[in-house]
Image: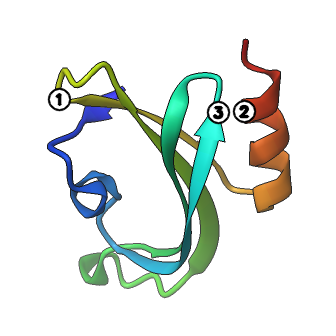
Amino acid sequence: MIGYNGDYGSTLPNHSETLKSEDINTSLGKGKLFTLKRSNSAASNDSTTWTEVHAIIPYNKNNLAYDFWVKVRKDILLDILKSIK
């Protein structure tokens, strides 16, 4: 669970660039799926980048949201979300 104020952008991790976003509908509710290009902070002197997929699903309007994320392909995360009942 993460803090959520109605703005999906504020829930995304630091040092990330949104490559793609799309609406999703899961058994937990409606949300958004983000494909992000991630990197370390400039202070780390590490220029490594990687891709993460985050599913942000608001929870009961309590200023919280589920944040499911993986460092794998989008289809794998969607399969995981489909398995949640």
- Sequence-wise, the earlier of marks 1 and 3 is 3
- Residue occupying the far top of the picture: 85
Compared to 85, does 11 lie above or below? below
Query: Dot 2: what SS?
Result: helix
For residue 79, side relative to residue 58 (left or right) = right
- The answer to whether the residue labelled 1 contacts the one labelled 2, judged by CB atoms less than 8 Å apart, is no
Q: Which disc, if any, is residue 48?
A: none
Give x and y (percent) for residue 77: 75, 45
Q: Viewer-proximal residue, 3 or 27?
A: 27
Q: Which residue is mark 1?
A: 63
Q: Which residue is mark 3?
A: 26
**Residue at 24% in and 79% down:** 43
**Residue type, mark 2 in image:** Leu
Q: How far apart, in angstroms, are the residues tagged by discs 1 and 2?
A: 21 Å
Q: Which residue is mark 2?
A: 81
- The answer to whether the residue labelled 1 contacts the one labelled 3, judged by CB atoms less than 8 Å apart, is no
Name the front one of labels 2 and 3: 3
Circle 3 Cα neighbour tier, 10 Å, few/some/many (<14 / 14–19 / ≥20)? some
Give x and y (percent) for residue 15: 34, 73
**Residue type, mark 1 in image:** Asn
Query: Dot 3: what SS?
Result: strand
Task: Locate the C terminus by quadrant.
Answer: top right
Circle 2 Cα neighbour tier, 10 Å, few/some/many (<14 / 14–19 / ≥20)? some
- Sequence-wise, the earlier of marks 2 and 3 is 3
